[in-house]
Amino acid sequence: MANDSIESGVLRGPRSRAEVALIGCSHRTAPVELRERVVFTPEQAVRAASELRESGVIEEAVVVSTCNRSELYGVSSNSGDSTPAALISYLSEFHRIPAHELNGRLYQHIGPAAVRHLFRVASGLDSMLLGEAEILGQVREAYGRALEHGVTGPVLNKLFQGALEVGKRARAETEIGTRPMSVAFAGVKLAERVFGNLKGHSALIIGAGAVAEQVVEHLRLREIRELHVVNRSIDRAKELAHRMGGKAYEWKQLEKLLEHPDIIVTSVSGAEPVLTRSALERAMAARSGRAMFVVDLGVPRNAEPEVENLYNVYLFNIDHLGEIVEQNKKAREAEIPRVESVIDEHVAKFLSWQSGLEAAGLLDALHARLDAERRALLAAHFGQLDGLSEEDRARLEKMTQELVERIVEMPSGRLRESRKLKRPVEGLAALRELFGLDESEREGPERKGKS
Amino acid sequence: MSFSLNYVCLAIYAASFAFYALNLYRDQRWMGYLATILLVAGLAAHYFALMDRARLIHAIPYDDLYGSMSLFAWLVAITYLGLELYHRERAVGSLVLPFVIFWVILAVAVAPSSVPRAPRADGALFALHITIGILAYSAFAISFLLSVIYLLQNRKLHRGKPGLAFWRFPALDLLERMSRSSVWVGWLALIASTILGFIWGRRLPGQYPMTDPKVVVTFVVLAVYAGYLWIVRTPTGRGARAAFVCACNFAVVLFSYTIVNLYFTGFHRYF
């Protein structure tokens, strides 16, 4: 029993500085030319994490790499201060980028700052598009991969599980992820405000601009029934139609095509409007007045302004959509304090758990230290007390054991209480120093031999 | 007893409204579920209040203005609950509940106790005639609210300046379908109620003239809502025009339920 305690104290150690450290670069610190050079493919991410662990730089590792950020997360049981430098050096070597090129382009965080950073990333606060949802999936994938390959440990497991929870809560409890933030998405969301579910509706794409393509992509995700593409260049129309699973038509068929779709997205260049009031009037009559939603992404405008006066026609041009996106941006920004409060809560929870873990290790070490002292003392005195019977020796042994248990029980109780209160345990460093527990970790094998 | 139950149901309706409003603002599913559960609880409390009242006056609750308005509020709430469950749409609850609460408060606090009681009339057929009639008014009230939301949403869409509520309320298409189903419920209920009224009246020849203003106005109500049901199916009428007609039609219902009941009719005093 006593030997086990010593062993556990020595082998596990008091986890004095199991700090989370991270280094990385993102759209905030590095241009795309550098970001694309430090991207990790999924295989590279696993390899890097394994190599970092094997090299002894860190005990646990996760690599998060997306188009906008590449980050290395690690946990080291020795002082975390040197870990970021080691991670930077590894990143530089791994991607064969001279250190001077990375200067000023990387950020590094240790301890609570690293925890907060990951939680901000997962909640979308650090994203280029505030509150975007994809990052949560990317963090989940990165963590899943690392977990699958066994390169994580208790600290990073807890940290990433916390991050996923923060991400979910931020989107469920605040407005940070709602409301469209791109012109294309805003157009589709507005169409949904008219028709509800877009499944079963049809769309006509006039022109083949980049934003129009984005609109089509959103429409396809909503399982739109039919997609017609018309363009001045039939080849370009065919290309887009082929890519998006629609049908291409000649430009001269445009007026006839207007009769069928519920959604029209237009983005052609030209001084003359392609959607005139009279053409749409005829189309509306032919389609029995069913509602029509027109997204005009062209500059100059492709639809005559009078079109919006037509009954059951909803016309949105690029300025309308831009204004809505701007409103939505402000609305999302207004949600930042609420997301931050969710993050604060989870950072405190994680730090409390982490200090609890550290304290538990420390108490194990303290117990082992006191027990070793007890046995050394008894061994020294039993030699001088020849008259003691075996029974008395056993009694003394038991009494001193109980004394050690009682001494350790009090801080253990306090530790349990502080965990319940979800606050970090304070004064651990003092305890470690006063009882020389770091030394006991170093002297462990020697002491084990003595006892 | 029934008054204290009314206060209990008012409190539960108010709590339900709070959660419907919070759900609209925060868009959290559990808040929506809680709002619906509270609405069901409010309906149960309201039902017992109505039953208590019926026992007290030895007649059906609509035998006076208070009972009639209270039953109207109860039927509005239950019609809305049916629509909510059928269309799986909760956002509208934040506008329906204040309407329900308003009528319960009016029934409890404003209804004058000195209004002369209507001639006593009994029988299951009569009870059915009146209850289904009030159900029709409730369904028309819901369709009115839905049409108003439609018009506001439509206006915001055309102005291109949607606010928070815009993204939360149902799509125009769903609002129109909800309104249409509500009008169908009201229209069919009113026809059934009118037929039952005629059958009941024929048993007492000479006592209840068929030319009573309430009967005439009921036919007008049926006609205007038939007009709505026709418009909403026409290509040039569906959408904002139909919603506008539906909202205006409710003025005839209100006229029938208030002015006609109190000042013109002889025996349809409270329903």
Image (cartoon, helix red, strand yellow):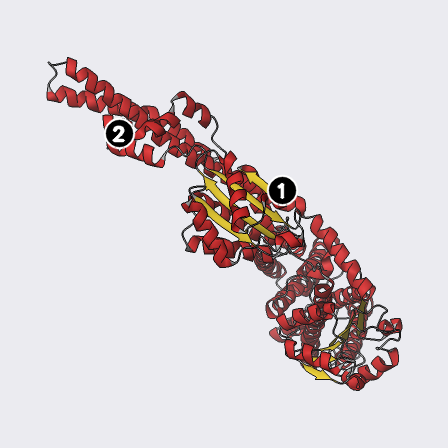
Residue A149 against residue B72 in the figure, above or below:
above
- Residue A125: x percent and y percent? 64, 48
Mark 2 closeness class: few <14, some 14–19, many ≥20 residues within 10 Å: some
Left or right of residue A339, residue A421 in this image: left
- Residue B210: x percent and y percent? 77, 80
Question: Disc 2 on helix, strand or loop?
Answer: helix
Distance of mark 1 from mark 2, alpha carbons? 47 Å
Q: What amino acid type is highlighted by mark number 1?
A: Asn
Q: Is residue A393 visible?
A: yes
Mark 1 closeness class: few <14, some 14–19, many ≥20 residues within 10 Å: few
- Residue A174: x percent and y percent? 63, 51
Label 1 vs label 2, nearer the camera: 1
Q: Earlier in the sequence, mark 1 or mark 2?
A: 1
Q: Disc 1 designates what residue?
A: A103
Q: Is residue B2 visible?
A: no
Which disc, if any, is residue A448? 2
- Residue A179: x percent and y percent? 69, 58
**Chain of the residue on which disc 1 is drawn:** A
Viewer-proximal residue among A102 and B167? A102
Name the quadrant of the C terminus of chain B: bottom right
Residue A406 against residue A82 in the figure, above or below:
above
Viewer-proximal residue among B128 and A7? A7
For the residues bearing labels 1 and 2, Cβ distance under 8 angstroms: no
Taking the spot 64% from the left edge, 76% from the top edge, the residue there is A243
Viewer-proximal residue among A90 and A172? A90
Left or right of residue B155, residue B101 in this image: left
